[in-house]
């Protein structure tokens, strides 16, 4: 810095560095626990959080709450953004984002419509079990995207967000209670067909 009182002021022109991540890193174990035990309600938060971080990184108005709530309409664009980020880093991850997004969206729609269309009277155990089996399947599909996100964020194991918080436990306990009630109902219908 110049000590002369007549010299023009000098500004720091170095670009600020940011440690703000572009995506929501979560450990695979935590992701599956929250996804399955909350009966996929966690997906709304997961998509919201990813879009919020993208909004913060790009300084664009992407409406994260809307994209989180209506996530099936924005799955392809999120996965495409992750793939673009990987390509920008000149890194490769073994996934097909378009195929994964399409499969995830189709299964999510089928499971949400299928359990309402399937005649519970004719095959009660299948009709009651389908949403729970589907929860595990769509969670496993979305886990592949989480792994790609972790890879893009250079935290493959998701160690930056592996610990379960108190609110995580509350949601998992509430969801676990629903799982228990549903399993009791499925077992009751399976053992006593007159209940259907």
Image (cartoon, helix red, strand yellow):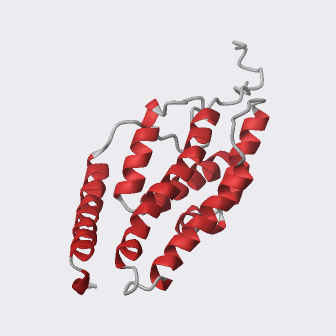
Q: Residue at x 32, y 42 (%)?
A: 164
Q: Residue at x 39, y 64 (%)?
A: 132
User: Is residue 120 in sight in this rendering?
Assistant: yes
Q: Of residues 126 and 7, which is closer to you in this image? A: 126
Query: Is 80 situated above or below 150?
Result: below
> Would residue 122 appear left or right of 84 to someone viewing this image?
left
Quadrant of the image containing the C terminus? bottom left
Residue 24, percent across and down? 53, 44
Q: Residue at x 62, y 40 (%)?
A: 148
Quadrant of the image containing the N terminus? top right
Residue 31, percent across and down? 44, 46
Residue 160, percent across and down? 45, 32
Residue 16, percent across and down? 65, 30
Name which quarter of the figure residue 178 lies in. bottom left
Q: Of residues 76 and 167, which is closer to you in this image? A: 76
User: Is residue 21 in sight in this rendering?
Assistant: no
> Would residue 98 appear left or right of 123 to someone viewing this image?
right
Q: Of residues 21 and 163, which is closer to you in this image? A: 163
> Would residue 104 appear left or right of 172 to someone viewing this image?
right
């Amino acid at each position: 810095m110049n000590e002369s009182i007549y010299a023009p002021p000098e500004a720091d022109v170095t670009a600020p560095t940011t440690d703000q991540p572009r995506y929501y890193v979560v450990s695979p174990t935590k992701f599956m626990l929250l996804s399955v035990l909350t009966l996929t309600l966690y997906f709304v938060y997961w998509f919201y959080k990813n879009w919020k971080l993208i909004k913060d990184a790009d300084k664009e108005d992407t409406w994260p709450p809307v994209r989180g709530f209506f996530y099936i309409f924005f799955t392809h664009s999120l996965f495409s953004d992750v793939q673009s980020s990987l390509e920008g880093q000149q890194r490769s991850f073994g996934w097909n984002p378009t195929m994964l997004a399409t499969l995830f969206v189709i299964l999510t729609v089928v499971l949400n419509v299928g359990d309402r269309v399937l005649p519970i009277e004719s095959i009660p155990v299948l009709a009651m079990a389908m949403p729970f089996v589907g929860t595990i399947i769509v969670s496993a599909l979305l886990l592949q995207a989480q792994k790609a996100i972790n890879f893009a964020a250079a935290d493959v194991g998701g160690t930056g967000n592996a610990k379960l918080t108190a609110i995580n436990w509350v949601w998992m306990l509430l969801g676990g209670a629903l799982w228990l009630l549903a399993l009791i109902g499925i077992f009751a219908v399976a053992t006593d067909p007159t209940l259907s």
